[in-house]
Amino acid sequence: MKIETKVLHSGYKPENGGPGTIPIVQSTTYRFDSCDHVAALFDKPTEFMYSRFANPTCDAVEKKIADLEGGVGCMLTSSGQAASLLSVLNLCCAGDSFIASSSIYGGTINLFGFTLKKLGIECIWVDVDASYEEICKAIKPNTKCIFGETIANPALTVFDFETWAKVAHDNNLPLIVDNTFATPYLCRPFEWGADIVVHSTTKYMDGHAVQGGGCIVDSGNFDWEKAYKATGKFADMVEPDESYHGLRYVGDFGKAAYIVKARTQLMRDFGCYPAAQSAFYLNMGLETLPVRMERYCANARKVAEFFKSSDKIAKVIYPGLPGDKYYERAQKYLPNGTCGVISISIKGGRQAAVRFMDALKLACDEVHVADIRTCVLHPASATHRQLTDEQLVAAGIDGGMVRVSVGLENVDDIIEDLKGGLAAV
Ligand SMILES: *Cc1c(COP(=O)(O)O)cnc(C)c1O
């Protein structure tokens, strides 16, 4: 089936006479009729036990997302940050390193560069446009995985899947990709060689700004046993898990080894699992994802062209616009569009940007992106506030930069509002 059908029918099949939509199972517990039954679950987790790490409502949504991405399994998390964290912790421990593209979400940069460092895990940063040889050079004997982002928030760089996937696989390393901005509607990273996908479902997948969440999806394609034999890495994917009665992830769960391990070890221990109610809302967003994404892209394309035609704007960054640095790469990996987010740089710097922002009436100034409503953010005074003007330049952000997340209002109304903003500059 195509994705428009999958978003409505995957993951949940109503029984004869059963509820037509995914029911909210608001229960922390599941009842069993014997001690032996419960004991068996502690030998091999095959049924719901406790809602800290699995729940039927969440499970239906997990199955749907796995199907949308083309993976063998998915685990929801309580935020996108939790998904990024667990995706790496499932492979790295103290003393290990991993490689990340330098162009990724700011929250992930803090997580990888500061917090994981305190846990003894080193993140090695490599330029997003590095060559095959340059990326290979950064790999160390203790490197366990590679991390990138399809369309980076907020830099809007487009990830060169083929180069990074080749480096990863030539070196027996799995490739993890944050696919938040693209969503499985615009790009399915597994088709380009990624092994693991993470999302902040808070953004387009939920789409309505009603709940935060994230997920990890496993392609099932990475051969852990082969990599273990070749390099000695990923022993805990293959050898018995002493924290779980000698469970063997590859031996007992085959292609789903990574995602089962993420749940049985990490979600069991950290417990950052969403509530059933949150998964229910997420599912409502997913059901309309294809129609929404199509409209986001169409609106953003028109808004990007409008910005391009204004003499008050120094720079428009939108990979869907011909002439953008990443246009050709976007045509290859994201032929159906590059989401609704545009970065612009207003002539006149910080003051001009603030005047523009404050004069907007429809677009909201909010710390969010990929909302259903058009919203704007001024990185220099908000998300990147701690940086000096020199540091801002180094990070590719100038005082006049505004991130515009184009919503689903009528595009003429959006452009009218933006015109009003620019008139105040
Ligand atoms: C927002 C975001 C995250 C973090 O997700 P939260 O749900 O806010 O924790 C991760 N990656 C990208 C690309 C994001 O935009």
Image (cartoon, rainbow, N blue to C red):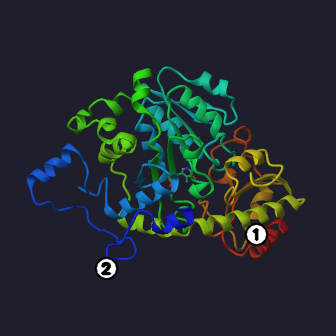
Q: Which amino acid does label 2 sit on?
A: Gly
**Quadrant in which residue 301 is drawn:** bottom right
* SS type, badge 1: helix
Foreground of the two, 202 or 241: 241
Please identify the quadrant where the C terminus is shown: bottom right
Q: Is residue 58 above or below residue 132?
A: below
Q: Which amino acid does label 1 sit on?
A: Ala
Q: Which residue is pictured at 36% across the width and 55% down the height? A: 273
Query: Looking at the rendered structure, which numbered label has been put on residue 359?
Result: 1
Q: Name the residue under label 2.
A: 17
Foreground of the two, 181 or 16: 16
Q: How many labels does the image show?
A: 2
Q: Which of the marked residues, 1 or 2, is nearer the chain's N terminus? A: 2
Q: Position of residue 24 (x, y in %)?
A: 34, 70
Query: Looking at the rendered structure, which numbered label has been put on residue 93?
Result: none
**Quadrant in which residue 365 is drawn:** bottom right
